Amino acid sequence: MDQLLLHSGFPILSVLIFLPLIGALVLLFVNNEDRCRSLALLFTGLTALLSLQLLFNFDRGTSKFQFAEHRPWLETFNINYTLGVDGISILLVLLTTLIMPFCVLASWSYIKTRVQPFMICLLVMETAMVGVFVALDFVLFYILWEAMLIPMYLLIGIWGGPRKVYASIKFFLYTLAGSVLLLVAIIWLYTTNNASFFIPDMMWQNYPLNAQILIFLAFFLAFAIKVPMFPFHTWLPAAHVEAPTAGSVILASILLKMGTYGFLRFALPITPEATVVMLPYVLWLSIAGIIYGGLTALAQSDMKKLIAYSSVGHMGFVTLGIFVLNIDGVEGAILQMVNHGVTTGALFLCVGMIYERTHSRELQKATGLGKYMPIFITYLAFFSLSSFGFPGTNSFVGEFMILAGAFQFGTANGGFPYLALAAIPGAVLAAAYMLRMLQKIVWGGTNNPDQSWITDLNRREIITLAPFLLFVFWIGLAPQPFLDLMHTSVTNLLQQFHAYTLQTVATSGPVF
Amino acid sequence: MLFLPELTVLGAGLVLFVISLGKPAAGTSKNVATALAALLVATSLLSLQSTGDLFSSAYRVDFFSQLCKVLLAVGTLVVLLVSGDGIKEENLPEYYLFMFVAVLGLMMLISSVELVAIFVSLELSSFAVYIMVPMRANSTGAGRQFEAGMKYLLFGVVATGVMLFGMSYLFGLTGTTSLATLTERLPEMFNRPAAVVAMAMVLAGFFYKLAIFPLHFWVPDVYEGAANETTAFIATIPKLAAVALLIRLVSMMDSHGDMLVNALMVCAVLSMFYGNLSALAQTDIKRILGFSGISHAGFALVGILTFQHIGYSTALFYIFGYLAMNLICFLVICTVASNGRNLEIADFTGMHKRAPLLALALAVGLFALAGIPPFVGFTGKLLVLLEALRQGHLLLVIFAAINTAIAIYYYLSIVRLTFCSDPEGRGTVTASPSVNLLAILLILVIIWMGVMPKTFLALTSAAVSAIL
């Protein structure tokens, strides 16, 4: 328990988890649709404001878990309610709480039927998502990780597009099937660790290599599906395309990050030796994802699908950064998780705004909007630039750090940086598909449909997108404050990792 | 008064017998039966703390038996409250009479600690249920209820025959029929094949009630053929009693029987796979729940075969949760099938518009059965698997986990129709306020047991302590 800095006084993390849930319960008794929207905005907004307290009081000098809470839950099995944030999770928690109010805003006029259950689903989602990032008890983590499927399934299945049934079932089955073996791994770790579900207790233990590999595979299946890594990505385009705007934003900005968060939080510290063994496969799968995602995105005519496949590519960069196992790579990966959340979330909001006007996601029906929607196009242009990592925007910093990490990884032992070179075309592809989309939407060609009846963004929509733009440039121009938040935790993680693997290599010879 | 719940249910049966002699006004018999069931809940709660022996120590009243009796009474009350129009009005008094007799038998079964007493009470409850199955109104049963009744009766009689045969072996080996003495004499004989065979044959009788592979084959046809409310009864109440007595029987062997552990493990794994894989292909909701029940019995067996105190209490917790999950599903089924017909899963199309609360209740029940947190199905599964892995049954746990993934498909396909499609002309479903209230209560219980299992686990643990 010495990894916890117990928090006395205001239990901020519990509040962040339960405030949205309380909001959902309150909404149960509200019948007026407009009041539902306002209340949902109020509760998500309040959660967002409260979460800023984490930022102000976060101690950047320690890698321990801060704001920690620890309460017994089920003593017979030593299951506890343990929460805490460190440098790895704090940005993701903030990303979650800050994005949710904009999901509510984005659904303001998009969702016309059954507003009350929709908002309840959003609020329950927020509870589960914040909980996943701050849970330090493996059972608590798993409960929230799985419980999240139900509201997300309903969001896609009820308010989704024409093929919502297929998309929602595929999403549910895929993610659930991936995580059932995670449960077995968790129970195995519990029984070998003196009956403790406390996650830090499971880290850096000397599990035998074959057990580590099996656990790593269980982790990998669960997390790789969530990321999603090539070739486990097929649920993503379907789910993204059919989900309502808010659902797409949640999926892209937050849900996908849980997979990469899982790798950092569990796979690296619990199964370090297995990580080293499996490293080459994971790295090359990441490269495959980057190239495959880029190429497929190039061929899409459905805007949401295009962005969905671009996510596969971007998340490939993130896993690449994590598994090169150096400071630049991992910090770049965490930053890129946030960047992807901001940029892709904003892009889905943009597509949602087009959809509300034209009722189509087809690129062909959205051409030539530049003349009639100047404000919208300004936003879209910046987000597109950010998406392919234009210098000065947030993704440039993240991708640059990841590539720098990949080069270091390749040249570390006097080798040649094949890996980094293989990833570079991904960046070029990103520019190609994003600029193609941007060009068509802004100018189009001679066959543009008549768009003169389309109105530009209203005030609510301008307000919804503005903060995303702020973060695009803030992270792009001054990333240091963000990196400072994670630096101590990442350094500590990598130091322990390399110390552990060096030690095992020294005692048992090279592992591969 | 040690015998109070049993006397109440016996009295309730007599009252219904008197009613059946006359021509009661419509609704009378159901109201009377419900009131009597409520009285039964009250008396079993009253005698929750009593302990003692009766009938020359053949009958034990302890916290274990009393807790299960409370649950039996509550379950019966819920079944009565949700029951629809599957039985003809003029048959209702007899129907409820047999239901109470069945409950009487099950209550006696839970308290029996002597082989002959076990056999007598099991037969008492079984014969009542055999008669309940074909009592379905022919307008909806269309003859299937007679086939179901015959199948249930014939297979059931054979299963209890086998059990009786096993009991004779046990008596021959040890010279006693009292469980307490058996517990002392049996462990030293567990290397003898005769003892293992005897034990396996005795267990077969309970496996039949619990529908564990390979004694599961009656389930789909009986579930389908019986009236909805009868199925609700069969699917929940006898299973609870069977698990309770199984725990009593197995706990007397301690962990002396490796052969028995392996046999139980094979039964558990096959039950799970058989139940889940067969359910994938079904379209009748009751058949689906029947097959899912087979796999859930397998899960309960996983807890029992750990031969540990914690394992028994989690198995008991699991079956309590199963009671709640199944009852909420049957609540929805009985309400939607307003004229007592059988439901295809297509009948739930667009339920979220036709009856939002019932749709929610069905979704909660099915997600809970599928083992998705934060519902009790997940918590029960987690705790059972935890204890199993602690005893080193890794492969068993992996098989169980794989089954969770298989099972989700058929549960989800019902939820899909409920929430993701439009009613397509199907009318709204109206539920009475009491049914709505019951649905909300059951949802709360399922979530409460899932999120805060502490209280319930303490109860089941105390109950298991009472018999060890």
Image: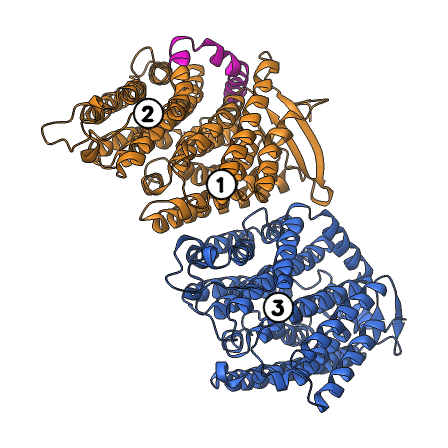
Chain colours: A orange, B blue
Tell me the element at label 1.
helix
Query: Which residue appears at 31% of the width and 16% of the height?
Result: A415
Chain under numbered label 3: B
| Relative height, residue A269 to residue B161 (above, below) | above
Which of the labelled discs sits on residue A457, or is there none?
2
Say which of A282 and A153 sits in front.
A153
Say which of B451 and A157 sits in front.
A157
Examine the structure image and report whether residue A157 is included in the region drawn in magenta. no
Residue topped by disc 3: B82
Quarter the N terminus of chain B occupies: bottom right
Q: CA distance from mark 3 to mark 2?
A: 53 Å
Quarter the C terminus of chain B occupies: bottom right
The three-letter code of the residue at mark 2 reads Leu
Could you say which quadrant of the image residue A111 lies in?
top left
The three-letter code of the residue at mark 3 reads Val
| Relative height, residue A446 to residue B21 (above, below) | above
Q: Position of residue A104 (x, y in %)?
A: 46, 32
Disc 2 residue crowd, few under 14, some 14–19, many 20+, Cα 10 Å: some
The span shown in magenta is: A473-499
Closer to the observer: label 1 or label 3?
1
Task: Mark yes or no: residue B375 visible.
Answer: yes
Q: Is residue B58 left or right of residue A336?
A: right
Examine the structure image and report whether residue A492 is included in the region drawn in magenta. yes
The three-letter code of the residue at mark 1 reads Glu
Residue topped by disc 1: A33
Question: Are callouts 1 and 3 both on one chain?
Answer: no
